[in-house]
Amino acid sequence: MVEFRMRPDGTRYPINGRKGRGGVVAAAGATAVALAAYTGGGAVTGGAGSIAGESISIRTSNAKQPARNGQPDKAWQQMRLRVTRQRAPEHYVDCVLHSFGQVRDFFIQTPCRSMTRTLVPLADEHGNTAVVSIAWVQMRTSRAARELDRLDYRDGTGDVTALGHSVLAAQGVSFTGEHYESRVKGTLFVRAEAAPVSGNPDPALLEGMAQVAVLLPRP
């Protein structure tokens, strides 16, 4: 049985084992209307461009190259996902203020150069909604980036705080670490984590969201 711990922002995360690579996420309970209010409106972009019956794994695979190419709209279309309007990414020079737990302690001892955070609200073809939190952290050395990756990957060590976490937590959106991906490229550490918002998004689709999001270039 998975045990959970409460973060400072009110969300919960599992403390057993490592961050998940798929699996079932705790129910979020927020409404699509509330998410639209947070992200600035209900207009959507993108569309369903995949062949009917195409598997989630194939859609995810097809979306990865557009993501690497810096084409997020095309990547989400390959996933059969719609992106609602979102606030602009935010950039910082102090990572301590935007993290907690052991990850925050790490930044105190090993300062980053900069951080960029964004939040991508997504809806699938059945009306289920989810969000993906993405953070790009520029460290001073490649060794520090790898150490941050190993630390952030483990459950119970804290996290980079999701953009808009207070609003999301108030609506019941919980980042549990079940649908998490990370990568390191030189001195850059990137983490992406998906969480359900309303309806019943497929866990495999949530995992695919994180796998694609982590490949997006820093905005």
Image: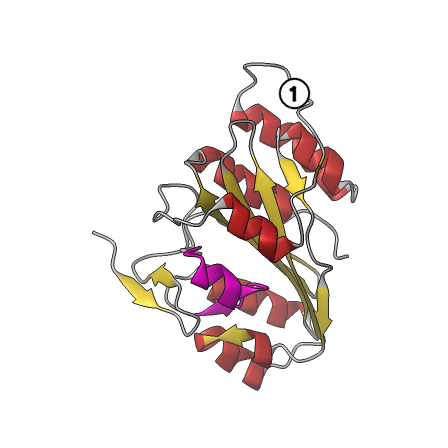
From the viewer's perspective, tell me whether residue 71 is left or right of residue 86: right
Across and down, in percent, residue 162 comes to: 55, 63
In the orientation shown, which residue stands out farthest toward the bottom? 109
Mark 1 burial class by Cα count in 10 Å: few <14, some 14-19, many 20+: some
Across and down, in percent, residue 115 comes to: 68, 69
In the orientation shown, which residue stands out farthest toward the top? 52
Q: Please, which colouring scheme is shown?
A: secondary structure
Q: Which residue corresponds to mark 1?
A: 50
Secondary element at tag 1: loop
Q: Which three-letter amino acid code belongs to the residue tagged 1?
A: Ser
Q: Who is closer to the viewer here, 204 or 182? A: 204
Across and down, in percent, residue 101 comes to: 44, 76
Q: At 38% across and 56% down in the image, what residue appears?
A: 18
What stretch of residues is rendered in magenta?
157-174
From the viewer's perspective, tell me whether residue 137 is left or right of residue 125: right
Quadrant (top left/top right/bottom left/bottom right) for the C terminus: bottom right
Instruction: State the image quarter where residue 74 is shown.
Output: top right
Across and down, in percent, residue 204 comes to: 46, 34
Residue 172 within the magenta-colored segment of the rendering = yes
Q: Who is closer to the viewer here, 118 or 126? A: 126
